Amino acid sequence: MAKVKHNNLIDTLNTIAEDAKSRGVIQLHTEDERFTGRTIRINGKDLFHFGTTGYLGLEQDQRLKDAAIDAIQKFGTQFPLSKSYVSHSLYQELEEKLNLMFKVPVLVMKNSTLGHMGVIPSIVRDEDAVILDHYVHWSVQNASLLLKNRGVTVDMIRHNNMNMLEEKIKALSPGREKIWYCADGVYSMFGDTAPIDQLKALCAKYPQLYLYFDDVHGMSWVGENGTGYVLNQYKELPENVFLFSTLSKSFGASGGILVSSNQSYFNKVKNFGGPLTFSAQLEPASVAAAIASAKIHLSPEIVEMQAELRSKIDYCNDLLAQTDLPLVDRNDCPVFYIGAGAPAVGYNFVNKMYDVGFYGNMGIFPAVPVKKTGIRFTISRHNQREDIEQLVTALSENFPKALEEEHYSMNSIRKIFDLPLIEKENKVAARKTETLTLETFRSASEIDAKIWDTYFGGEGVFNHAGLQFLEKTFTGNEEKENNWQFFYLLVRDENKKVIAATFFTFALWKEDMLAPASISKEFEEKRKSEPGFMVSTALIMGSLFTEGQHLFLDKNDGRWQNAMDLIIEKVEELDELLKPSSIVLRDFDESDTQIEEYVLKKGFFKTTLPESCTVEDLSWANTEEYVSTLSSKSRKHFRQDVAPFEDYFDIQVKQTLTEDEVCQFMALYQNVWSKNLDVNTFPFNRGVFEQMSEDNNWEFIVLKLKKEKQGQNETDNPIAVMFCFNNNNITYVPAFIGMDYDYVQKYQTYRQMLYQTIVRAQSLGFKKINFGYSSSFEKKKLGATIYPRVAFIQAKDNYSIEMMGIIQKK
């Protein structure tokens, strides 16, 4: 398998967003003429509003509204001047009140995103390092990645994994002045919190450790003067802890704030904090509203508001505790998340809640892992106790319906979120498969070769004979990465007609396999000292050795989706048994929108693969006829870069290899493997090449320089070899190549090897050549047809994706 294109993540996110939009769960518009906070009107229906982040409801407080209106009348809609020169008349009062609230200096900024971009590059020095929690808010991650342009190390840990954090601190400590750990105080999707006590202990143990918290979801509803979750845990803010919070959300106004007791760093940010210098300042109305809110926060009234909200949160928690709903994290936060698992369940569930009059947000990728979709709802002071009671009742009634309609059980969802299983499990209704039956096999020897080859004869190295080769080669090895488990799936109807067929392997893989080569280069550097870095298990359609269309699916049969349901259910069963970090479905036609729509709703995201290359016209009889099949540009290329070098080589075809040849060819293969990070697999061991030599379906095209063409000190040994598989005398499969790079440019070795492979396949009477991935430009010039391919991936979390994003950012 090869790598995805650089822009693939953006394309993936766009696809998922378009799908969610088409299902009516994102990019909606309210239709209210005025807001009360308790309900919102969407698509002509009034819904109880359980999606706000204004937890205290201050955005509807008349005092804030009056202050904003008065400021507009006095000062206008904006004060268009940089705050570095002059701040408008209301700023000083706001900052004074915020200083009283937090009891340390506070700096007001335009918003959180610009604020992080101003603060983080100002306080992190070139000799420092940064570690991100992989759930920390996007705005913090994005601002931190700006540091990489200065050569600052930016790393990441799995969410709230303090053991991993300590290991990173130890590894980064030498030569670093400070190590910054960036986290959220309260995480916006699941409502869980940073482990403050453990972080305090780490700071005591490692004086280099500095903490940077984004606590925008902890603001106002908790803490003295509503100063938030983090400060409520600390009581007094140490100099090594930097707090970023907000004047929007619960505070009811707008703007971001930096809170710090470290006066030196505070002054650096204030004097030159990027967007603080060059961006517009907050509008008078926003500052005035924030002042009005600050007055409330400094009064006893804030305690009453917090208590009112807390009683509603507690009431909701008590009601949820009486249900079997999979609440992902029970705490005192106003954010609740009911896990739904696959997007299909999430879409169904959220829309059912809309239908019965309740609005909540759907959690979708990349905010949550693609298989951890759910409904995120929030409690605010606007919500009445009867609203909350009706909400929990509606959740309890509609979630089982959504599960039943999408054929999931309650415990299957709980397993996804690592929640305790329930004893009284709802039974999943049997799918209406119209008598379709799934057959599962663990070895190709259990399957009739004629049946299997009816569907995969003429593909890659996975006809029946190819599978037997793979099983023999990738079992019983010393290296874990070269030991695979095999699973073969056939779906038949009542007449034994095959509707679908495929196979999966369970193996170790490098998680950067589907990433740009630049990422793999950095990962490989880390693997020199940490071989298991970003290496995990995967359940893969096909195998790491094979390329081609690994799924036969009779799309002309109206039951094909039923057949796919059976395959996906088996994959989910294997997922529970084997617990891979990722599931990969591959290699599909990019234009197959039916498969794409089906797979996306099952909890996968799409990723683009390199183009697949196939030579489909081998009907020519000689070189002249072959050249005539090429385009005019390709004919010119052939005459300049291929034909003139043919006479330089002795071309041999070998069926079996001596021990010396196994060593030589393995070394040539390793040359290509070590340079080709675009296909960053584990290297094959000697046994692979020995098995090829013993298998009659493999042969080796070998290039050696003719003696009379050899320059001074040039070798008599082979300088290139193509490892070729015969798939049922239909398709010639040049699976891998080995080369001596000292000769590639001088003698155009790679191009010559491609051409000689074409000549060999034609001479043997094959119908086509499966040239696989990579180097599509070169293969196209020699007559290959190019086919765009995609894969669909399901990962347990987004850690590896976000790690790659960090590495990729330069």
Image (cartoon, grey):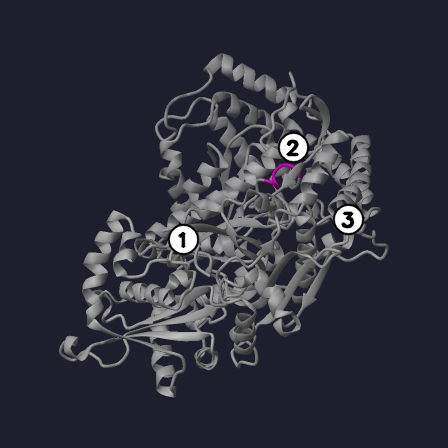
Which amino acid is tagged 2?
Thr
User: Relative to 182, does residue 401 appear above or below in the rendering?
Assistant: above
Residue at 75%, 49% (x, y): give it: 407
Mark closer to the observer (3, 1): 3
Residue beneath disc 1: 808
- Circle 2: is it few (<14), some (14-19), or many (20+) Cα within 10 Å? many
The percent position of residue 136, horizontal first and vertical second, equals: 54, 49
Q: Which residue appears farthest toward the bottom when viewing the image?
A: 659
Residue beneath disc 3: 432
Q: Which residue appears farthest toward the right when viewing the image?
A: 424
Q: Can residue 589 be seen in this view?
A: yes
Mark closer to the observer (2, 1): 1
The span from disc 3 to disc 1 (Cα, nearest Å) is: 46 Å
Which amino acid is tagged 3?
Lys
Residue at 33%, 52% (x, y): give it: 150
Residue at 37%, 52% (x, y): give it: 148
**Between residues 684 and 222, which one lies in front from this camera angle?**
684
Q: Give the range drawn in magenta.
A: 217-221
Q: Does the magenta stretch include residue 107?
A: no
On the picture, is 313 further left or further right than 634? Answer: right
Residue beneath disc 2: 52
Considering only order in the chain, which callout, 3 or 2, is on the residue closer to the N terminus? 2
Residue 665 tag number: none
The percent position of residue 62, horizontal first and vertical second, equals: 65, 19
Q: Is residue 104 visible?
A: no
